Image: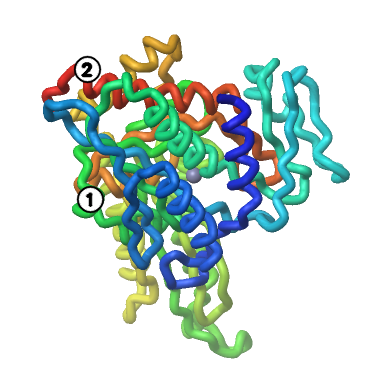
């Protein structure tokens, strides 16, 4: 299977599918169709029925081969790659039985160094796919796409493996936060799903952040500094005051685990007008709501000193902790856990300090935990994929559908 994984991943990563946050179209870039159309064609060649919509959501069905009803399981991966780094002319390099030493990336001065990326020491003797240092690899999430395609191929070649109806979804624009945006949960029509979009071996994730973004706009009054006394209001100072009233220690650089934060991402302006952009993150819904409330209280505190309310706060929720939707459906977590146990994989269920497509899909009615793909250092030139771990991920997919069929799972 390794040779097939290498071949498929090589072919897919060479197709530029970078998404674009400045575009309002779906998919955000036309080039994502290049891979979507190829996948549709390859699925049809395997006699797997596909249905694709105008927004670039490619769904496919592998029909049940048993005569009793079991839940329909979905597997999802996104076809786009990150806009954060060059994604054209990806030139993947293969390292056979990795010796655990630092690897120089192509002709560049970049080095994939286990001293910097300690998780590489777990990949000794693995076959790795890496970049030539000039682009990202795009294994995020083409490794997930490959794993799902290979699992389908495997199931077709092994009809003795019993499974219910399986739904496949390849989706656009995850990297710009719009993966679930036009995902038609009804059309997908699965009872639950898994995104193949995690990183390290063993990851099984079903807890994400609750997430919001906040824009603080401060309106000042600009007067000649020579005659400014009791007249000038400096918007920059208002912005500084606002930020200083947030707790010092609750920032990304000083938190981990279940600790939430306020992250000031951008602060720009002049005397007349200043804008501060924050993201707010917390796993706990109550704490999350309190964080948003705190911003409004700071606004009111500052505004109380002025007549025309110079500080405005605009908060938008982005996604919620999927645990709230998934944990009550314990079997969705237990199924992959049993599969991991059979394959001797230690599950790592640490909460994600971020979100996945599953964070939104779970709230749209499709509970969707996330599973490892075997790749790391996403979104940049140090990205890599372990073909050995990818092989395990394929076994996990096959194991899940088998487990669902054999347990005649009772939802
Ligand atoms: Zn991804």
The residue labelled by disc 2 is 406
Label 2, label 1: how many angstroms apart (C-alpha)? Answer: 28 Å
Mark 2 or mark 1, earlier in chain: 1
User: Is the CB atom of the residue marked by disc 2 within 8 angstroms of ligand 1's nearest atom?
Assistant: no
**Residue 143 numbered mark, or none:** none
Q: Which quadrant is home to the N terminus?
A: top right
The residue tagged 1 is: 364
Q: Residue 177: where, in percent of width, then height?
A: 43, 56
User: Badge 2 local density, few (<14 within 10 Å), some, or many (20+)?
Assistant: some
Residue in the picture at 80% in, 30% down: 103
- Residue 19 as seen in the image, left or right of residue 404: right
Q: Residues within 10 Å of mark 1 (few under 14, many from 20)?
A: some
Q: Is residue 312 left or right of residue 9?
A: left
The foreground one among 150 and 333 is 150
Where the C terminus falls, by quadrant?
A: top left
Q: Tell me residue 7's x, y (percent).
A: 63, 37
Determine if residue 263 is in view: no
Percent across and percent down for residue 349 are: 39, 24
The front one of 98 and 277 is: 98
Q: Residue at x 52, y 55 (%)?
A: 35
Residue 321 in the image, given as x and y percentages of width and height: 30, 41
Q: Is residue 110 above or below residue 372?
A: below
* Label 1 lies in ligand 1 vicinity (Cβ under 8 Å): no
Q: Residue at x 46, y 21 (%)?
A: 202
**Judging from the image, what secondary structure is the residue with disc 2 in?**
helix
Image position of 208 with respect to 410: above or below: below
Compared to residue 327, the image places residue 161 above or below, namely: above
Would you say 34 lies left or right of 116 here?
left
Q: Name the residue located 38 percent from the left edge and 10 percent from the top edge.
A: 342
Disc 1 element:
helix
């Amino acid at each position: 299977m390794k040779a097939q994984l290498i071949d498929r991943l090589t072919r897919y990563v060479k197709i530029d599918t970078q998404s674009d946050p400045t575009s309002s179209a779906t998919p955000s870039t036309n080039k994502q169709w290049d891979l979507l159309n190829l996948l549709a064609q390859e699925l049809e060649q395997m006699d797997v029925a596909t249905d694709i919509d105008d927004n670039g959501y490619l769904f496919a069905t592998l029909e049940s081969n048993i005569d009793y009803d079991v839940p329909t399981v979905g597997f999802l991966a996104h076809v786009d790659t990150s806009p954060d780094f060059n994604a054209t002319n990806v030139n993947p390099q293969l390292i056979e039985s990795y010796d655990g030493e630092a690897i120089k990336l192509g002709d560049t001065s970049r080095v994939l160094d286990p001293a910097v990326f300690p998780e590489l020491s777990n990949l000794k003797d693995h076959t790795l796919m890496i970049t030539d240092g000039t682009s990202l690899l795009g294994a995020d999430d083409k490794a997930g796409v490959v794993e799902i395609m290979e699992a389908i191929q495997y199931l077709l070649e092994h009809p003795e493996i019993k499974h219910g109806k399986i739904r496949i979804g390849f989706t656009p624009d995850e990297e710009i936060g719009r993966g679930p945006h036009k995902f038609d949960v009804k059309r997908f029509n699965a009872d639950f799903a898994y995104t193949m979009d995690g990183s390290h071996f063993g990851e099984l994730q079903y807890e994400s952040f609750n997430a919001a973004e906040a824009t603080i706009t401060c309106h000042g009054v600009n007067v000649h500094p020579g005659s400014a006394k009791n007249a000038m209001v400096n918007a920059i100072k208002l912005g500084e005051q606002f930020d200083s009233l947030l707790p010092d220690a609750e920032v990304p650089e000083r938190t981990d685990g279940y600790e939430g934060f306020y992250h000031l991402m951008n602060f720009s302006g002049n005397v007349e007008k200043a804008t501060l952009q924050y993201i707010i993150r917390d796993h706990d819904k109550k704490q999350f709501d309190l964080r948003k409330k705190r911003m409004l209280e700071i606004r009111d505190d500052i505004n109380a000193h002025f007549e025309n309310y110079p500080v405005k706060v605009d908060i938008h929720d982005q996604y919620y902790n999927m645990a709230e939707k998934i944990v009550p459906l314990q079997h969705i977590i237990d199924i992959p856990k049993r599969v991991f146990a059979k394959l001797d994989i230690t599950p790592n269920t640490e909460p994600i300090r971020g979100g996945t497509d599953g964070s939104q899909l779970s709230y749209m009615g499709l509970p969707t935990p996330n599973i490892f793909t075997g790749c790391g250092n996403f979104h940049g030139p140090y990205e890599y994929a372990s073909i050995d771990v990818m092989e395990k991920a394929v076994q996990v997919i096959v194991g899940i559908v088998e487990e669902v069929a054999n347990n005649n799972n009772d939802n």
